[in-house]
Amino acid sequence: MEDLGKYSTVDIVVGFNDMQMYAIVDAIVDLHVYSFTHNGWESVGFSLQELKETESIATILGALADRLKQRSPYHFGKIDMLMELLGKDDWSERYLISCHSGEILCALAHGDLWSENIMWEGNTLRAIIDWQLAHCGSITEDIMRVLSTCVSVTSRKRLTKPLLSYYYTKLKNKMADCGKTLPFTFADVEVIF
């Protein structure tokens, strides 16, 4: 095992630069090439039964929303609208079922990809750590997570389309190098995102 002590993370307030975002997409592409060329990874992550045995995310979020409303009705008076958008049932359960049924185009997803789980040496990505939430997830899940948590709004708006295009082109070329074709188009990537 490599010692990661000499590498560092990027401060979430600073966020990733463009070069780092493309390096992250390169790593995601490699993970997805593995997913599309190997079997067995689909069982990684929580099963539906395990998900049902834990306290539902909807229950936790509902309790949190109620506490926020009690503490500051002025600031959180409209949180019920957000809770309504999340749905009455557990979205994580719906998502898991959609992924495993083939309703959503899926690959192996890290599940917790953000600045503190990516180790750097300058702009060179050296390691992605903390894989305990890895699972079968949407092909755009990790890209969405990094774009929504690790770059500014301005960077997210500017980088989203180019990064998705880069992801698709790079994945298509790497799959061709393996003698395989992608089972989806760039338009599919945009819809899934």
Image: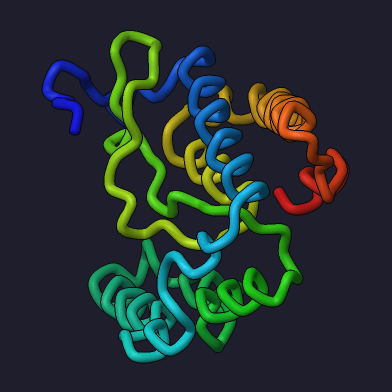
Q: Compare residues 156 and 183 and report the one nearer the observer.
A: 183
Name the residue located 46 percent from the left edge and 71 percent from the top edge. 79
Give the residue at x 56% y 23%. Answer: 155
> Which residue, as the protein is rendered here, is positioned at the far front?
179
User: Taking 47 as reference, is 78 above or below it?
Assistant: above
Residue 43 visible, this angle:
yes
Side of 38 relative to 168 (left or right)? left
Using the image as rendered, state which of residue 171 and residue 164 is in the foreground.
171
Pinpoint residue 37: horizontal percent, then vertical percent: 65, 47
The quarter of the image holding the N terminus is top left
Q: For this rendering, which residue is in front, 130 or 193?
A: 130
- Residue 92: give x, y in percent of width and height: 51, 74
Image height of 159 relative to 129, above or below? above
Number of dots carrying numbers: 0
Which quarter of the figure has residue 149? top left
**Residue, far top:** 122
Up the image or down, 70 lies above or below 1; here it is below
Q: Residue at x 28, y 68 (%)?
A: 72
Q: Nearer the viewer, residue 151 or 141?
A: 141
Q: Residue at x 39, y 13 (%)?
A: 124
Instruction: State which quadrant residue 45 falls in.
Output: bottom left
Residue 161 at least partly seen:
no
Q: Is residue 80 left or right of residue 37?
A: left
x, y (%) of residue 179? 79, 35
Q: How is the image coloured?
A: rainbow
Left or right: 44 as drawn, with respect to 165:
left
Q: Is residue 81 above or below residue 12?
A: below
